[in-house]
Amino acid sequence: KRSYTIAVLPGDGIGLEVTPPALRCLEAAAARFGFALEFRSFDWASCTYYLKHGVMIPDNWKALLQECDAIFFGAVGDPARVPDHISLWGSLLKFRREFDEYINLRPCRLIPGVTCPLAGRAPGSIDFLTVRENTEGEYSSIGGRIFEGTERETVIQNTVFTRVGVDRVLRYAFELARSRPAKKLTSATKSNGISITMPYWDERVAEMAKEYPDVKVEKYHIDILCAHFVQRPHTFDVVVGSNLFGDILSDLGPACTGTIGIAPSANLNPTARKTDAEWMPSLFEPVHGSAPDIAGKGIANPVGMIWAGQMMLEYLGEKDAAALVLSAIENVLGGAKARLQEEGVDVLTPDMGGRGTTESLGNAIENTIRSK
Ligand code: NAD
Ligand code: IPM
Ligand code: MN
């Protein structure tokens, strides 16, 4: 029997609430397709752990994660008690770097049943992928403060673009664009203002485009690209950007499709193999954070986490199970109005305009996976 070991790090806030329904959906899919999932849940990589132990993760964190085939991560952050840069650099950002998960793949789709905040957009008309550089760029720890406490206080943080780092994310994005019907790649930069690193990214795009004559390439400065995301989101196919720009676009895109609560994210090291001298597992998580404003209320949208689990199944090679989970998400959301009328059960959580709960939506998706 095929079997996979999954490290489960629920984290903080709503990470703790969306993880259980997502695990049940994955279990349901595994049962249908005859493979086993062994979940290893850890309470570290959370602010609760930090407040108890003074560190975000135990000394042997790496070995524990490397025993697993993939990492399923909820959300970290409790900004009222632990500064965000401490909790995030001590967990998620560390995992991305140490396991060299250089691709952050974030699909964005307007799903039937979810109200689009933009006028005149039909379900399915928005369907693109953001490919975010995930290990360097603006997220560097190079810099510091000088003349602290004086009027000359100066704070510097450098952006790092390496040829290897830029080329490998562009290569992935070009290949992805080539594999899709529209064969279109949009690159986000800001080469007018950020005059050293961003023109370099443009140069690498232009260079690689020569190898992909079949891919239509366009580039925009990040500011106007944000405007285009709102005004003509249906025209995008694969969008590639640096660490920071990719971060921003991957909240904006899903917001244009109704809510960031449904958006998934795959932090991939696409070249890692389990037989390598050092195994570098990939990490799957929702795009959203720990949402302290709604934590504990039971109303967090579990779809981002479930969909992230779907991307993990795909990564593990369980394509049929992955397809079933995605269709269950779409069926449940698409049938939400009918279900409310016929059964009196609201599955749309408040971020999607309903009065549903994490449980009502999670259960509906799980049951659909079990019964289809
Ligand atoms: P957030 O994504 O946690 O929340 C932003 C807004 O979206 C909030 O109003 C929240 O209620 C809403 N929201 C988010 N996910 C939702 C869901 N599934 N269902 C319904 N509503 C949802 O972003 P933030 O407020 O900027 O950050 C809160 C904390 O999370 C901070 O500590 C931040 O650093 C951290 N964070 C962690 C991750 C991660 O672990 N991957 C990602 C983003 C933010
Ligand atoms: C994300 C998050 C993280 C990021 C934060 C929490 C450091 O916003 O995964 O999108 O910026 O990468
Ligand atoms: Mn983000």
Image (cartoon, rainbow, N blue to C red):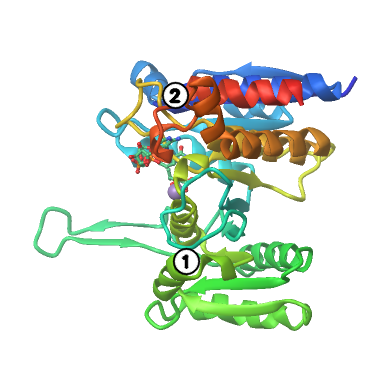
Amino acid type, mark 2? Thr
Q: Position of residue 93 (x, y in %)?
A: 50, 43
Q: What residue is disc 2 on?
A: 357
Q: Tell me what residue is drawn at x 63 percent, y 53 percent.
A: 103
Question: Which of these two is toward me, 209 or 214?
Answer: 214
Local packing at callout 1 (Cα closer than 10 Å; few below 14, some 14-19, many 20+) is some
Picture quadrant where residue 132 is located: bottom right
> Does residue 342 sit above or below 289 in this rendering?
above
Lower sequence index among marks 2 and 1: 1
Q: Tell me what residue is drawn at x 12 percent, y 53 percent.
A: 149
Residue extending furthest toward the right: 1
> Does residue 26 sit above or below 195 in this rendering?
above
Question: Which of these two is toward me, 318 or 42?
Answer: 318
Locate the C terminus and report the quarter of the image it occupies. Answer: top right
Helix, strand or loop status at disc 2: loop
In the picture, measured across the screen, residue 107 lies left or right of residue 225, that is: right
Residue extending furthest toward the front: 342
Frontmost of labels 2 and 1 is: 2
Q: Tell me what residue is drawn at x 87 percent, y 24 percent.
A: 2
Q: What residue is disc 1 on?
A: 229
Local packing at callout 2 (Cα closer than 10 Å; few below 14, some 14-19, many 20+) is many
Q: Position of residue 64 (x, y in %)?
A: 64, 23
Kindly check if marks 2 and 1 are in contact, taking CB atoms under 8 A apart as contact. no
In the picture, measured across the screen, residue 78 lies left or right of residue 276, that is: left
In the picture, measured across the screen, residue 167 lies left or right of residue 139, that is: right
